[in-house]
Amino acid sequence: MTVHPVSTPTLPGVRPVIDVRAATKIYGSGDTEVRALNGVDLLVERGDYVAIMGASGSGKSTLMNIIGCLDIPTGGRYLLDGVDTRRLDERRQALVRNRKIGFIFQSFNLIPRTTALVNVELPLAYSGVKPAERRARAVAALERVALGDRLTHVPSKLSGGQQQRVAVARAIVTNPVLLLADEPTGALDSHSTAEILGLFDELNLVGRTLVVITHEDDVAARAKRVVRLRDGEIVMDERVTALSGPPPGVLEVVR
């Protein structure tokens, strides 16, 4: 089955955020060889909102790791915001991850005994941003996700939804070109899920590029585009009519 990648027309001089061409990923060799990806093409323009779906073993996680510069393809190429990731050593890959990608994980990945503010400051500290500037940027990011009154709370004093909003603030504080979310609502109840998806809607409305890895149809329905993998290949890549989310600003009053 041939699936032609979906894309939005790119303005002259504007490069795509994600440009994956004929990517393969092979683990092992001989009788133990596993082809996790088999000639995947994926183009994601600035401001798009893409959900990537697939069953266990479909290649979904492998593709996410490549997009997130946590792994490199065996064959083909991946350009992240114009940077050819094949040419990066481990140190430069880490720099690219920190500067260009904001990660949001199912398990939040917050430091337990550290305040929300310090958790959000961490990516800026790794980048060498001076204390006063990183404090101001972290406060602004937490206010953006409606947690301006929770700056000094440690994760154990926050609900699951609030912890995930701290994680979103940490992801956006570096102003990355890509927000990459791996099952971001998997550990949340329905109310907190609605909050996070509403926040994603708001971030996309102001031009953030989002790629969400999910197995949940309701989560994927909020995206502008759904990509489905099976046996290491893209079998569906379609624009969808996203469900209407809460209006911009609604999370500013959610506590």
Image (cartoon, rainbow, N blue to C red):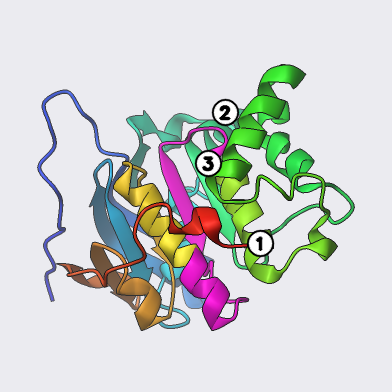
Q: Does any portion of residue 185 appear in the rendered image?
A: yes
Q: Is residue 22 left or right of residue 158?
A: left
Residue extending furthest toward the front:
253
Q: Nearer the viewer, mark 3 or mark 2?
A: 3
Question: Which quarter of the image is occupied by the N terminus?
Answer: bottom left
Whether residue 144 sits left or right of residue 242 in the image: it is right
Distance CA(mark 2)–CA(mark 1)? 32 Å
Q: Position of residue 128 (x, y in %)?
A: 70, 20
- In the image, taking residue 215 as reference, residue 134 lies left or right, namely right
Residue 177 x, y percent position in the rendering? 41, 37
Does the magenta segment cover residue 180? Answer: yes
Relative to 17, residue 131 above or below? above
Quadrant for residue 237, please give it: bottom left
Tell me the quadrant of the picture where the C terminus can be found: bottom right
Q: Which residue is mark 3?
A: 172
Which residues are drawn in magenta? 172-195
Q: Earlier in the sequence, mark 2 or mark 1?
A: 2
Q: Is there a contact, CB below 8 Å, between mark 3 and mark 2?
A: no
- Closest to the observer, 133 or 11: 133
Instruction: Assess disc 1: are there few (<14), some (14-19) or many (≥20) residues with their C-alpha within 10 Å of its C-alpha.
Output: many
